[in-house]
């Protein structure tokens, strides 16, 4: 038995056991905590990999593809426009357009702007603003147009420099073969070859076709190559449009219309020529005309096809409705005699007022046939009560007044033909010789 005496130190070998065990326990605890931390980190990494590789795989694949893939449209060729004999009125010519991928250009933006400014004569700042605005913030673009519809001879000067990051696109541009001939009828297209006026707009879907596409991939050297994963989709070209217009008649009509306007010192005029057997429009002219190849030089109001958009009171031409109604319902014989009032007829109105109707020919009496021949307002006004409001209105509607003709042109109006319940006490007489009614030139023709 060991006896401990005060003041006598213990044997170190006998008193070290408890501290060693405590240190071992502390080390084990720390090591376990380290393993647990590493395990949790591994689990978190694994979960993140699952999220990236499986849950959000599509999202990250799309982001990755944007870094090296880009889809380009292959524009369809717009259909031509021909006259009835196959003369080309509108076709296409190929021009060159230049676009840029600002991300690929990187630090070469300034040198690219310098080269474009030198070739096209614009300020360098013009191209720098395009490239820098497209490459800023979250709204960065991978495609920005620098120049559109450049003549091939000019484009060749720039193509020879082989600028990396510049996309060269062959684009069709509309070409009109006869300057301002039938300008308002044919209409024009915008810079993307979409019809925005006239027949170009009305038949835009028919003539525009369907654009194709190709996906380009950039390799490690930055060169663009067609992607093998995405087959090229070829464009479907648009259909051609053949008009009933006769180019020869159209030229003559416009020439004579211009001469007539000059002779009468008028501001404008229009003319329309139809085949009386078929109703086909052989010529349609508006003067002043528009040069479709330089349409931006004209005010948009000049593009209006007034043959179908404008209305006016037809006057004596409308007497055909009055005469045909009288004959249709067998109300008046051709030899029936009327007092033509020597060219002036006063009608007494309610309230003691009078209305004066005049003829250009002073006649004593006229048969109904002579009244048609001499275009007598007075006789037509006297016949109108015999016809009556309902029959007159029905006859005018049967002729197509007050409703669109349905011609294949944009902007056609229906004209204005009031219903009998909307008439005043003098409307029937006024309408009998072409007033209080509004028609389009096409309706009259």
Image (tube, helix red, strand yellow):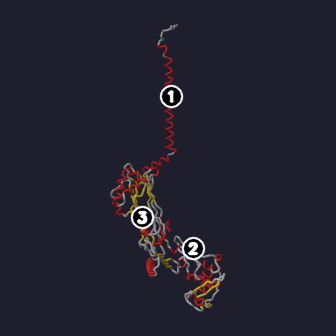
Neighbor class of circle 2 (other Cα within 10 Å; few <14, some 14-19, many 20+) is many
Of marks 2 and 3, which one's residue comes earlier in the chain?
3
Image-based side of 5 in relation to 217, left or right: right
Neighbor class of circle 3 (other Cα within 10 Å; few <14, some 14-19, many 20+) is many
Q: How far separated are the C-alphas under marks 2 and 3?
A: 37 Å
Evaluate if marks 2 and 3 touch, with contact meaning CB atoms under 8 Å apart: no
Quadrant of the rendered structure where residue 169 is? bottom left
Task: Identify which residue, 24 or 87, lies in the foreground.
Answer: 24
Q: How far separated are the C-alphas under marks 1 and 3?
A: 73 Å
Image-based side of 234 in relation to 349, left or right: left
Secondary structure at numbered mark 1: helix
The mark tally for this picture is: 3
Secondary structure at numbered mark 2: loop
Neighbor class of circle 1 (other Cα within 10 Å; few <14, some 14-19, many 20+) is few
- Above or below, comparing residue 323 to residue 205 in the picture: below
Residue ID for mark 1: 32
Residue at far bottom of view: 364
Residue ID for mark 3: 172
Residue ID for mark 2: 414
Q: Position of residue 343 (x, y in %)?
A: 58, 89
């Amino acid at each position: 038995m060991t006896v401990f005496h005060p003041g006598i130190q213990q044997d170190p070998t006998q008193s070290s056991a408890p501290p060693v065990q405590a240190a071992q326990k502390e080390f084990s605890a720390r090591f376990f905590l380290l393993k647990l931390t590493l395990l949790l980190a591994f689990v978190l990494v694994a979960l993140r990999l699952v999220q990236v590789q499986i849950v959000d795989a599509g999202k990250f694949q799309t982001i990755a593809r944007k870094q090296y893939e880009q889809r380009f449209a292959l524009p369809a060729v717009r259909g031509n426009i021909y006259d009835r004999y196959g003369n080309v009125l509108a076709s296409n010519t190929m021009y060159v357009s230049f676009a840029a991928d600002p991300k690929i250009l990187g630090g070469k933006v300034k040198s690219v702007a310098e080269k474009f400014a030198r070739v096209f004569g614009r300020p360098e700042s013009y191209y720098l603003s395009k490239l820098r605005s497209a490459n800023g913030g979250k709204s960065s673009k991978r495609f920005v147009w620098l120049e559109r519809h450049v003549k091939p001879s000019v484009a060749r000067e720039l193509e020879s420099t082989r600028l990396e990051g510049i996309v060269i696109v062959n684009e069709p541009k509309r070409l009109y073969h006869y300057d301002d001939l039938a300008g308002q009828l044919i209409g024009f297209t915008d810079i993307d070859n979409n019809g925005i006026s006239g027949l170009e707009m009305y038949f835009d879907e028919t003539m525009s076709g369907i654009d194709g596409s190709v996906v380009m991939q950039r390799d490690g050297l930055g060169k663009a190559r067609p992607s093998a994963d995405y087959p090229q989709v070829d464009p479907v070209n648009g259909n051609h449009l053949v008009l009933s217009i006769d180019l020869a008649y159209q030229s003559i009509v416009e020439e004579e219309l211009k001469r007539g306007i000059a002779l009468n010192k008028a501001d404008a005029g229009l003319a329309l020529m139809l085949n009386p057997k078929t109703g086909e429009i052989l010529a349609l002219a508006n003067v002043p005309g528009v040069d479709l190849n330089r349409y931006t030089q004209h005010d948009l109001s000049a593009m209006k096809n007034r043959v179908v958009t404008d209305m006016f009171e037809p006057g004596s031409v409308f007497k055909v409705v009055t005469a045909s109604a009288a004959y249709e319902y067998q109300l008046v014989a051709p030899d029936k005699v009327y007092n033509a009032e020597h060219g002036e007829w006063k009608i007494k109105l309610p309230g003691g007022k009078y209305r004066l109707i005049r003829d250009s020919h002073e006649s004593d009496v006229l048969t109904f046939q002579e009244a048609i021949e001499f275009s007598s307002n007075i006789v037509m006004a006297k016949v109108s009560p015999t016809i009556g409001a309902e029959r007159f209105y029905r006859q005018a509607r049967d002729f197509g007044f007050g409703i669109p003709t349905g011609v294949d042109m944009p902007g056609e109006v229906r004209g204005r033909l009031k219903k009998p319940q909307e008439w005043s006490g003098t409307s029937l007489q006024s309408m009998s010789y072409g007033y209080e009614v509004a028609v389009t030139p096409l309706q009259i023709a």
